[in-house]
Amino acid sequence: MDYVKTNEIDPAKLDAIVSRAIGDLSAGYGGVMVSIGHRLGLYKAMAGAGPLGAQELASRTGCAERYIREWLGSQVAGGYVLFHAVSDSFELTPEQALVLANEDSPVFLAAAWGVPASMWSDEEKALEAFRKGSGIPWGDHDGRLYCGVASLYRNAYKASLVPEWLPALDGVVDKLKTGASVADVGCGHGHSTVLMAQAFPGSRFRGFDTHRVSLDEGRKIAAEAGVTGRVAFETARAENYPGKGYDLICFFDCLHDMGDPLAAARHAARTLAPDGNVMLVEPFANDRVDDNISPVARMYYAASATICCAHAISDGGHMVLGAQAGEARLREIFYKAGFTRFRRAMATPFNLVLEARL
């Protein structure tokens, strides 16, 4: 069946969309190679080692040389590794190492490919959800999702949460220094909770989530960081977690995943101290669809369609915000919940950092 007439095709526009599609397809193939390089320790073996031959890298990592050589070719083609033709050797630059080898780097991205891998694995669930309008609970996804998301957010939080985001809020750092009560709602693996506990030893922190596997991981992370005595992780929903008089309530990249974000905001209003602060960190988004045209927005919309909206629908679907909700819609929710002040404290290319007060 012919969908368009050949004489209606603009060759230049066709070339542009084909080039874009091939670039995207290449990126998808390349992501598999990045994940393999990360999981086999290939990038770590190359970091700081200078030029290496394929056989030397294979020996260092216990892998087969023929596979390693082909993998290295993919890395050179993708601009992730340098090739020295004279010596037939390959080198990972310091900048490339920050993105691909250093797991503590704020721009480390190699493990993030677990997220699209989980999306592909869950494609049949997504197809059914699209057709039926049904939801997919967070805990029903492929296990690579949780590690990929945690890895992606952990380093961003490590780089920005304590030095930049908290100081942007009104009086919060002083409260945390003198001793505050903090609720981290939707805490996941608890990286944000633990980072705050490490920075402010006089304060107490409670992380709440509905995903028990993530909470178990959070307890391990807290124990490794030596903050177990001041951090507690508990299974609870955003609209009924225990406690009152919190000086700071945090929602890190999670409010848009909830089936009833208004109920979550109302519960925050009930449990917040009169002079307390709510810190709302959400994926960066402008308020109009046509102002959200960028690689980051595209990534967020895709995750929203298969993960965020899917969970919100499974969670009751009273208000399905999606990962590109935008500041105006979020402000409306908090005003409806009884807050009287709402402002953008700061923004990054990836996040909006918002503050609400009673």
Image: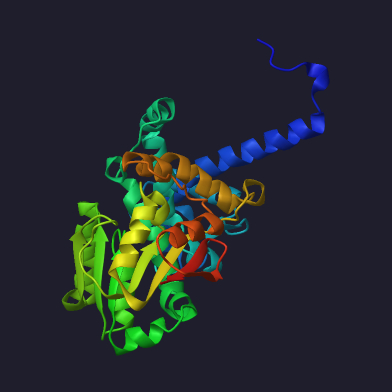
The number of numbered discs placed on residues in the rendered structure image is 0
Q: Which of the two residues, 144 or 139, is positioned nearer the viewer here?
A: 139
Classify 137 as above or below 250.
above
Q: Give percent across and percent down for residue 165.
A: 46, 75
Please state if 82 lies on the left or on the right of 143 as rendered: right
Q: Quadrant of the N terminus?
A: top right
Q: Give percent across and percent down for residue 212.
A: 20, 53
> Is residue 11 at all visible to an observer of this figure?
yes
Q: Which of the two residues, 312 or 229, is positioned nearer the viewer here?
A: 312
Q: Quadrant of the C terminus?
A: bottom left
> Is residue 100 at all visible to an observer of this figure?
no
Farthest top residue in view: 1
At a point 44% along the width and 48% down the height, the residue shown is 68
At a point 49% along the width and 78% down the height, the residue shown is 168
Q: Quadrant of residue 127?
A: top left
Q: Quadrant of residue 131?
A: top left
At a point 30% along the width and 89% down the height, the residue shown is 178
Q: Which of the two residues, 213 or 318, is positioned nearer the viewer here?
A: 318
Classify 165 as above or below 301.
below
Q: Which of the two residues, 265 or 71, is positioned nearer the viewer here?
A: 265
Classify 209 as above or below 244.
above
Please state if 284 lies on the left or on the right of 117 as rendered: right
Q: Give percent across and percent down for residue 350.
A: 53, 61
At a point 46% along the width and 48% down the height, the residue shown is 321
Please state if 308 lies on the left or on the right of 87 as rendered: left
The image's colour scheme reads rainbow
Please state if 26 lies on the left or on the right of 112 as rendered: right
